[in-house]
Image (tube, grey):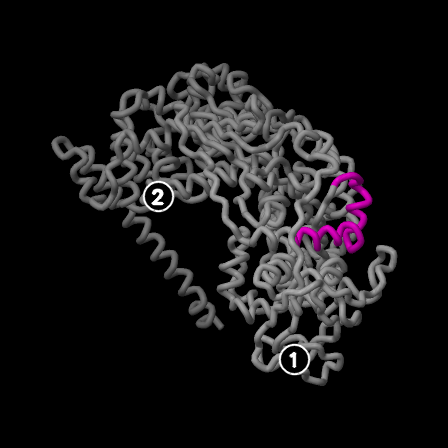
Amino acid sequence: MESEKQEKQQPKKGKRILKKLGKTTFIVAVSLLTIAVGAAGVGLGAVQAFTKDEKIRTKADFEETLANFSSDSYVYFGDKDKTEVEKMHRKDSRELIKSSKEVSKHLLDALFATEDREFYQHSGFVPKAILRATWQSAIGMDDASGGSTLTQQLVKREILKNPEKSYQRKAKELIDANRIEKYYSKEEILVSYLNSVFLGNGANNKLLYGFKVGAYGLFNKDIDKLTLPEAAYLVGMVQSPNRYNPNNPAKEADEAIKLGTKRMQLVLKNMLTVNKITQKEYDEAIKADISKSFVSEEELNEEGGMENYPYIMTAVQKEAVDILKDIDKEKNPDRGWKDKQYNDYVRSGGFKIYTTIDKKMYDEMDKAASKIKYNSKSIKGLKKGKQTEQIGAVMVDQKTGEVLSFVGGTDFKKNQKDHAFTARNQPGSAMKPILAYGPALDKGIISPSSIVVDEPLAKRGSSGYYDGSKGPITTTYALEWSRNVPAVKIYRDVLRKLGQGGLFDGYVKKMGIDIIQKDRPVDSLVLGGASVGYTVEEMTGAYSMFANDGVYNETHIIREIRDKDDNIIYQYKPNPVRVFETNTARQLTSMLRGVVTSGTGKTIGNGTGGYNVAGKTGTTTSYFDLWFVGYTPEVTMGVWSGYDYNAIGDQHLAKEAWVKLFKAAAAARPDLIKKGSSFPSGSSRYVQYESGTPVDSDTPSSGTQTNPNTNSNTNTNNQKKEKQQQTPTPQQPPRNNGQKPPGGDKINPEDPTKNQTQFKFGDGGE
């Protein structure tokens, strides 16, 4: 047993030896490096030998990060007066200082005494300080002094953004620290440092960057009003913010404060040593109970754009990052920034970002959304308490692609997920016009009055059947009542005629929707089942093409971006893309009008009253996701409702929300959304629809079979016959006074999400 125990301990001992050797190697390398740098006559040449492949940064390179970092960015509404939304930072997130004179003298004294006593004398680094800190670390001193100057720390954090311990990284740090000192004054370096330091979480769990924000988020104080113990505590957090932060969710507050207090006392001792405080001040401060100074979440008063319009600011930041990435791909491909750097740049780059958002419409829609009753429920397998049902909505001007207004969720403070532009959900049968009816009309496979047989249909690749029971019906009726079998038949025939490239690249991608390869041949895709799902913005954009006579305009929320010198660096340029022929779009609109006047979306027509609306409902299996995407001759709006996790939603919420949000928008902009305006009519023609053999050979023919065990070869050459003739009068099932036909609108196949909590999947529905 003893031998076995020794064997088990051997690897651990080996790891400790290797770790110690690695640390020693690093210490020796840094020491030699520092001696080389500090030696008279050698200068930085020896260091540059370590970094021959490293870019030598110019002032312009540093300016890109440091100067822009110190400028607030502002966002504006899209009205004629360009009303300001607010600056992109919030007081509890990243409020910047402009001068060190704004800062408490206690904090500056504590900072210099602890982090850089020779700040105003050195040229970026202090060789003897590095050697001293390296030696103290080697012998394991708990209170080892820092060897990096404020300039070095700024370089490591903001220029290199690399905490790796290697002599190559240290060499780069020393070179850049030296160069920054040549380009910038001590005041400029100090201000950048004060704004850059990370201090963990604030009392309301927002990340804190910069001492000004730290003073507010931890103590609810302006940075010039800090007491001596508070200033010392903040400075003590610099080296290890999460260790000393009482709001660290992974640490007990009492433990963090206990450790932070010990560190605070060390800072106070340093201040006494360099005569920045008297013995009396030290004695009083060391006895202070700092735990009483920390602010609670309830005590923080939030204000500003991120509080008044948080969803706008979040959506604008996301789109601005994408824009800047695209600009860099063309003009600055070697930049190599990560997402965090782009996000910081957008918030602090001094930009003026002009949006397309109509303030009056947004305010009225937001007010209407706040009055809707949302259900809450506990979700099996989720230990987060009750979850509130959410909505996401986007309203677009289809003639330009401009997002006029949107709703990101029910309550940003409780749920910061953006359900309009970011969240992806299964679209249910809202996909049917996109994947089946639209392309089929455009290619002459069907017409609005073509006859399709709604019958039991074998599923490809399985022994199951899609439930069909209405017999011969028109394609218009099939779409109005969201019958699944006709949609699957038409989808299969579109794929057969166009191929995957012809459908997904030739049509769907041009609508702003990109469908992954593995989903493309699957029947359930046309019923709304996809691996990832789609955003409300994407679905709304696709339908806006139907509304705009078949021409797609990319949806966008940013119209223009100007830099800190007021130069235009981005301006949206229209690039209209024709997807459908004009007559196709008008025929499809006529069919989708029927959804609202007599089909699954009749409550929309009844609720809006006086407005001509076309659109489509969408419901996934088990009512996990519910949609209505609709449009008038002027605007298009998509609405999704559901939970962020698998749970049965209110089957009326999406349609109810669409009506209330639409009426609020119309009341805000009657000059744009006009009551009584009509859609242009399309020319009529009749196409005899003959469903060909299925896409794969393992499935019986869909044709006109009435018995799922019988194949019916309706067209041996798999060719579609188009007949131009007077439209016949087919026998249609009764309308049932606007109610759902029995056994119609929804199927319930085997649910692949059973017992899953994290992901949702749709397969049919309205």
Q: Residues within 10 Å of mark 2 (few under 14, many from 20)?
A: few
Q: Amino acid at mark 1?
A: Thr
Q: Is residue 302 left or right of residue 706?
A: left
Q: Secondary structure at mark 1?
A: loop
Q: Residue furthest right?
A: 737
Q: Residues within 10 Å of mark 1 (few under 14, many from 20)?
A: some
Q: Is residue 12 magenta?
A: no
Q: Is residue 267 left or right of residue 357?
A: left
Q: Residue furthest left?
A: 41
Q: Position of residue 450 (x, y in %)?
A: 69, 65
Mark drawn on residue 330: 2
Give the residue at x 26% y 35%.
Answer: 57
Q: Amino acid at mark 2?
A: Glu
Q: Position of residue 112 (x, y in %)?
A: 38, 23
Earlier in the chain: of badge 1 and badge 2, it is 2
- Residue 278 found in image quarter: top left
Q: Nearer the viewer, residue 685 or 532?
A: 685
Of discs 1 and 2, which sits in the foreground?
1
Q: Position of residue 754 (x, y in %)?
A: 71, 65
Magenta stretch, residue numbers: 587-611
Q: Is residue 607 magenta?
A: yes
> What quarter of the picture does the C terminus occupy?
bottom right
Q: Are marks 1 and 2 in contact (CB under 8 Å)?
A: no
Q: Which residue is mark 1?
A: 714
Q: CA distance from mark 1 to mark 2?
A: 54 Å
| Residue 730 visible, this orientation | yes
Q: Secondary structure at mark 2?
A: helix
Compared with 570, 222 (above or below) is: above
Give the residue at x 66% y 37%.
Answer: 412
Q: Is residue 251 left or right of residue 193?
A: right
Q: Position of residue 686 (x, y in %)?
A: 67, 63
Compared with 20, 694 (above or below) is: below
